[in-house]
Image (spheres, helix red, strand yellow):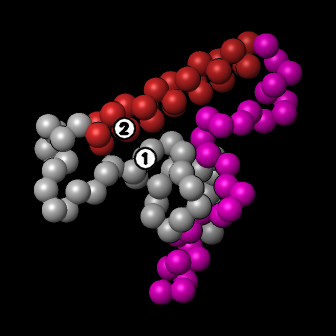
């Protein structure tokens, strides 16, 4: 269980997709604009996930076993739940 916890927990300093741009990319205006568009699309996806989780009319969103969808939600708090999409993976 300890190994599973260590390998599946995101680090406390984890960087998630669409949150920060790398230094060299910040210097090029065309790349910076494209990255901002990408970041906005990521944020839009997160808002859609939150909206769908709040909609009780959607299938499997009501009842005793209410579990919100968080697997591919772009951002996350550090936890072993598999939430968030990290910029990279290292094991």
Q: Position of residue 67 (x, y in %)?
A: 28, 57
In the rendered image, which residue does mark 1 sit on?
72
21 is higher (above) or lower (below) than 34: below
Quarter of the view holding residue 65 = bottom left
Q: Residue at (74%, 33%) from the top-left corner?
A: 21
Question: Within the magenta stretch, is there residue 14?
Answer: yes
- Left or right: residue 23 versus residue 10 is right
Q: CA distance from mark 2 to mark 1?
A: 9 Å
The secondary structure type at the circle numbered 1 is loop
Q: 6 or 68: which is nearer to us?
A: 68
Question: Within the magenta stretch, is there residue 27?
Answer: yes
Number of numbered callouts drawn = 2
Task: Locate the C terminus and report the quarter of the image it occupies.
Answer: bottom right
Q: Earlier in the sequence, mark 2 or mark 1?
A: 2
Q: Residue at (50%, 79%) from the top-left corner?
A: 4
Q: Which mark is residue 11?
A: none
- Left or right: residue 63 versus residue 78 is left
Q: Position of residue 5 (x, y in %)?
A: 53, 77
- Left or right: residue 43 versus residue 23 is left
8 is higher (above) or lower (below) than 84: below
In the rendered image, which residue does mark 2 sit on?
49
Q: Position of residue 40 (x, y in %)?
A: 55, 23
85 is higher (above) or lower (below) than 55: below
Mark 2–mark 1 CB contact (< 8 Å): yes
Quarter of the view holding residue 53 = top left
């Amino acid at each position: 269980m300890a190994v599973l916890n260590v390998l599946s927990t995101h680090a406390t300093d984890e960087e998630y997709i669409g949150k920060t741009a790398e230094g060299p990319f910040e210097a090029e205006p065309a790349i910076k604009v494209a990255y901002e568009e990408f970041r906005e699309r990521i944020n839009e996806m997160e808002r859609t996930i939150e909206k769908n989780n709040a909609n009780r009319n959607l299938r499997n969103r009501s009842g005793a076993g209410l579990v919100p969808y968080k697997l591919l939600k772009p951002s996350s708090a550090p936890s072993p739940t598999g939430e968030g999409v990290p910029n990279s993976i290292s094991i």
